Image: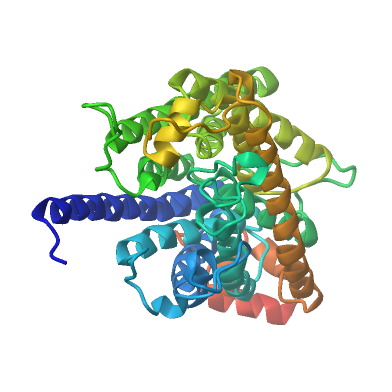
Amino acid sequence: MEVSWETSVTDSINTIYLLFSAYLVFVMQLGFAMLCAGSVRAKNAMNILLTNVVDAVVGSLSYFLFGFAFAFGGGPDSNPFIGTNYFALKDIPSTSYDYSFFLYQWAFAIAVAGITSGSIAERTQFSAYLIFSFFLTGFVYPVVAHWVWSSNGWLHPGSTSLLFGSGAIDFAGSGVVHLVGGVAGLWGALIEGPRVGRFDAFGKPVQMRGHNATLVVLGTFLLWFGWFGFNPGSFNKILVSYPDTFDQGNWTGVGRTAVTTTLSGSTAGIVTLFGRRLLVGHWDALDVCNGVLGGFVAITSGCSVVEPWAAIVCGFFAACVLIGLNIIALKLNYDDPLEAAQLHGGCGAWGLIFTGLFAKEEFVIQTYDSGNVGVTRPYGLFLGGGWGLIGAQVAELVAIVGWVSVTMGPLFYILHKLRILRISTDEEIAGLDISSHGGYAYRADPEETGPRMYGEYLRFQDQS
């Protein structure tokens, strides 16, 4: 049947919107790279930059071969747990998905591995990154994405058999992306243990600040920019009009989502600024950057279904969660150079709960039913929507923590037992750049007393 020119134009605009959103999300890889590089010591900058590149290139292949199929593969033998077709993009484009959708979802997948890399920075063998990055983006993350984002998934809010009559609302992935990456990083950091010298003989924390605040701030703003593709872009289509209105459609939701994203991140940033000022006695730019990101992580679940005022509430408590978890982590001698488990895991978990409390029914119907008149759905508990939605949100949270724990935990433990997870103490003290990558990312700092070239490092090893 011949397609009308109106349909062709609509499809073209929607495709351009999705592709542009994919490009924005991919820019977040640059943001992660800058944030990570600035947050570690100078002697490990080359290593963390390379791991960010590896997350992208290895994740691309694993997601192409397996990940997309596990996440969105449907068909007659589909099931609520895992996808079963579209391996290596066979039969794509299909009536359901095209290449632009794959590219957008790929940009999400490689972000997960970047989150986990931050938790185990400065002490991990490079080969371990290759292994866990492939497994995480090719299998662990896609299964969770299938649960929540595939129409066949058991948590999907458009499933034929809705969990608790609601399904879980995780619009852009506080749970699917951030909680998955955060829990994976938690297990990696726990199994590896803290960096050499991070805690003294009495268990007191020793400060190991990142070496470059400029890169941290640059990375934060790049991530902020990319989040406008991450959250608003998750509508996938912008030219969808709502019935019984002449001026509202997905474009309205896209704008609102960008606003709620900005308000949550900004609120978390300002609360972190003053909260840390009270705790440490000075204004800390690096802490504020992590606070901003924590607000973004938390709002990512409910960004399309909450009012702007609720986003401010989200950001306020996201900052409290992040500050609190960081204090607990130090008391437990837990070492995460990027605070990734606390930020992405803790704030991601709060984001799921927040959505179950504050989702507005009108916005839920607009997002998941294109504003169809006469549709009713469970919505936020605090707005009178009952327990269905919050129950589904808690179910998603528990399921993700359990799934990632039983997959990534054993993987990290096996790598640890095979002695291919953590570098030696000598290599860690010298720095991964000189011991594993042939030299520093920068000209060596005059204060550095260790070897400055790879040849010097090898001679140093022979003498020791």
What percent of the width, then of the height, locates residue 82? 60, 67
**Extreme-left residue of the structure:** 5
Residue at (36%, 29%) from the top-left corner? 256
The colour mode here is rainbow
Q: Is residue 40 visible?
A: no
Quarter of the C terminus within the rendering: bottom right
* Residue 430 in sight in this render: yes
Please tell me which residue is depicted at 28% across the width and 43% down the height of the picture: 238
Vertical comparison of 248 with 17: above or below: above
Q: Is residue 318 left or right of residue 248?
A: right
In the depicted structure, whether residue 22 falls above or below residue 204 = below
Q: What x and y, as percent, mark residue 143?
A: 60, 63
Q: Position of residue 421 (x, y in %)?
A: 71, 71
Task: Tell me: 240 left or right of 199.
Answer: left
Name the residue at the bottom extreme.
462
Left or right of residue 224, residue 209 in this image:
right
Image point (57%, 57%), residue name: 153
Number of numbered markers: 0
Which is nearer the eye, 296 or 441?
296
Question: In the rendered image, which quarter is residue 235 located in?
Answer: top left
Q: Quadrant of the N terminus?
A: bottom left
What residue do we see at 48% from left, 45% from top?
172
**Which residue occupies the foreground of this view, 380 or 449?**
380
Establish if 7 lies above or below 394: below
Pick the front one: 4 or 260: 4
| Image coords of residue 167 (percent x, y) | 59, 44
